[in-house]
Amino acid sequence: MRFFIHTNGNNMLFVVTEKGEILETDWSKLENTEDTNLTLITCIENKPNSRLYVRAVLNNI
């Protein structure tokens, strides 16, 4: 999966490299990495102690 972000006249292509379910207390997916990436974390319906995360890496275009 991939998606574009358009901001301030720049187009950035991100490619999803990871996704999964983590505990609400797990912040390890937000630790520093060597590449430019975007990490999204959101709630999961009917699972108050879990979170869905998606990580995507910038793919220069």
Image (cartoon, helix red, strand yellow):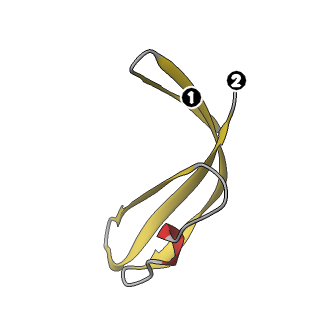
* Residue at 46%, 65% in the rendered image: 52
Q: Quadrant of residue 1?
A: top right
Of residues 29 and 23, the one nearer the viewer is 29
Disc number for residue 61: 2
Q: Residue 34 or 58: which is nearer the viewer?
A: 34
Query: What residue lies at 37% left-to-right and 84% top-to-bottom?
Result: 25
Image quadrant for the C terminus? top right
Q: Which numbered circle lies on residue 57?
A: none
Contact (Cβ within 8 Å) of mark 2 with mark 1: yes
SS state under label 1:
strand
Residue 26, relative to residue 51: is it above or below? below
- Residue under the point 39% across and 20% down: 8
> Which image quarter: residue 27?
bottom left
Point out the residue furthest to the top here: 9
Neighbourhood count class around disc 1 (C-alpha, 10 Å): few under 14, some 14–19, many 20 upward = some
Q: Residue 55: x and y, percent?
A: 57, 55
In the orientation shown, which residue stands out farthest toward the front?
34
Question: Does residue 2 lie above or below 23 as drawn?
Answer: above
| Figure quadrant of residue 12 | top right
How packed mark 2 is, by other alpha carbons closer than 10 Å (few <14, some 14-19, many 20 or more), is few
Find residue 14 and report its horizontal and vertical position in percent: 61, 38
Residue type marked 1:
Met
Measure the alpha-carbon separation of dots 2 and 1: 7 Å
Between residue 41 and residue 29, name the one nearer to us: 29
Q: Which residue is mark 1?
A: 12
Which residue sits at x=33%, y=65%? 43
Which numbered disc, 2 or 1, marks the residue that appears first in the sequence? 1
Mark 2: which amino acid?
Ile
Q: Position of residue 16 (x, y in %)?
A: 64, 47
Above or below 13: residue 44: below
